[in-house]
Image (spheres, helix red, strand yellow):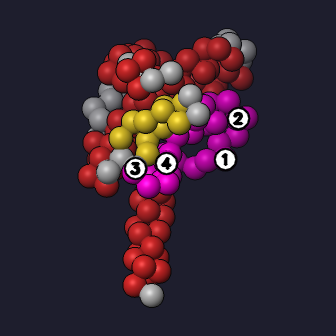
Amino acid sequence: MTLNDFYIQEYCDSAVEIAKKVSGVRLDYSEASLEGIEKVIGDIRRIKLQKLISDDAIWSTSVNLGTYYGEVLLRNGLSKRGFSWQIRNDMPVLADGKSNAISPIYKIYKKLAEPKDLEGPLRDNYKMFLFMLDNAEKEYRKMREK
């Protein structure tokens, strides 16, 4: 898979439609829309518990919602930090030119596939990722100064 094979806008458009149809949620690429994604995830998990959705559909939904989640992260701060969509191990991830990467698709998949949400809210995950990036950068600078 190359990045050209990954249709970001089409997946995001599908996520917007899924959110509207499944949960009546309007997604607008704001950080606040991550709460809407949480509602959609909760609704899909309830559908999954009733065995009304296949594992393939869970993966497909994860790709759509995960791509949207990634775009929210990029538009709300990660692109300014040098992050972009990249393919690593045949999987689209958000990565910078260093060794920092996050897989929004896999994060959504874990939230949908697991019986309990062990990941915590998406907004909190995003803030923690930013915190770790900031602290890693500070530590890296300290090491270089020595």
Q: Which residue is mark 2?
A: 114
134, 56: nearer the viewer: 134
Let me know if residue 114 is in the magenta part: yes
Labels 4 & 1 near each other (Cβ < 8 A): no
How far is the residue under mark 3 from the one under mark 1?
Answer: 26 Å
Q: What residue is at 48 percent from the left and 37 percent from the top?
A: 93
Residue sitting at 73 percent across and 35 percent down?
115
> In the rendered view, does 84 fall on the left or right side of 136?
left
Three-letter amino acid code of the residue under disc 3: Asp
- Regarding mark 4 in the picture, which secondary structure is present there? strand
Vertically, is 99 above or below 29? below
User: Of marks 3 and 4, which one's residue comes earlier in the chain?
Assistant: 3
The percent position of residue 75, horizontal first and vertical second, equals: 28, 42
Give how far apart the Cα atoms at labels 3 and 2 are: 28 Å
Residue 96 is marked as: 3
Residue name at image x 45 percent, y 87 percent: 146
Q: Are discs 3 and 2 less than 8 Å apart at CB?
A: no
Viewer-nearest of discs 4 and 2: 4
Amino acid on which the number 2 mark rests in the picture: Glu
Q: Which mark is residue 101?
A: 4
Q: Which residue is mark 1?
A: 118
What secondary structure is found at the residue carrying circle 1?
Answer: loop
Of 23 and 125, which appears nearest the observer? Answer: 125
Give the mark, 4 or 1, whose residue is nearer the N terminus: 4
Amino acid under disc 1: Leu
User: Which span is picked out in magenta?
Assistant: 97-126
Disc 1 + disc 2, Cβ < 8 Å: yes
Q: Earlier in the sequence, mark 4 or mark 2?
A: 4
* Disc 3 and disc 4 in contact, CB within 8 angstroms: yes
Marks 4 and 1 sit apart, C-alpha to C-alpha, by 20 Å
